[in-house]
Image: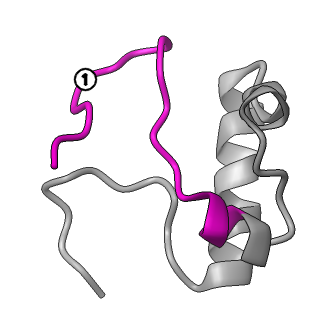
Amino acid sequence: MGLGADVGGLAMCYRPDLFEKAGLPTGREEVSALWPTWDRYVETGKKFAAAEEASALRSAGSRSR
């Protein structure tokens, strides 16, 4: 399986099941509307991390907790 490593602002890979557990929308258009700015992207990541005890803002090279 391959996921985009440098997708810039053009694409986002996410797990709908984990978004749903975190109380976030799961539909493509709804998720896209979550972060119209970088500040809102970080805000959404913090909400996800608080609900899932995992970080949405990690790179492929980061270590697991």
Q: Between 28 and 11, which is closer to the camera in this rendering?
A: 28
Q: Position of residue 18 (x, y in %)?
A: 62, 71
Image-quadrant location for residue 8: top left
Measured along the vertical axis of the image, is residue 37 above or below residue 16? Answer: above
Q: What residue appears at the point 74 percent right and 80 percent down from the top-left corner?
A: 51
Name the amino acid, label 1. Answer: Asp
Q: Position of residue 49 (x, y in %)?
A: 63, 72
- How crowded pointer 1 is (Cα within 10 Å; few <14, some 14-19, many 20+) is rated as few
Q: Magenta includes 17? A: yes
Left/right of residue 51 with respect to residue 54 in the rendered view: right
Q: What residue appears at the point 75 percent right and 78 percent down from the top-left corner?
A: 21
- Looking at the rendered structure, the number of numbered marks drawn on it comes to 1
Q: Position of residue 43 (x, y in %)?
A: 75, 48
Measured along the vertical axis of the image, is residue 47 above or below residue 52? Answer: above
Q: Magenta includes 58? A: no
Q: Secondary structure at mark 1?
A: loop
Q: Which residues are magenta?
A: 1-19
Image-quadrant location for residue 15: bottom right
Reading the image, the residue beneath label 1 is 6
Q: Look at the magenta stretch and give its main secondary structure.
A: loop
Q: What residue appears at the point 16 percent right and 49 percent down from the top-left corner?
A: 1
Q: Quadrant of the C terminus?
A: bottom left
Left/right of residue 28 with respect to residue 4 in the rendered view: right
Left/right of residue 11 with respect to residue 17 in the rendered view: left
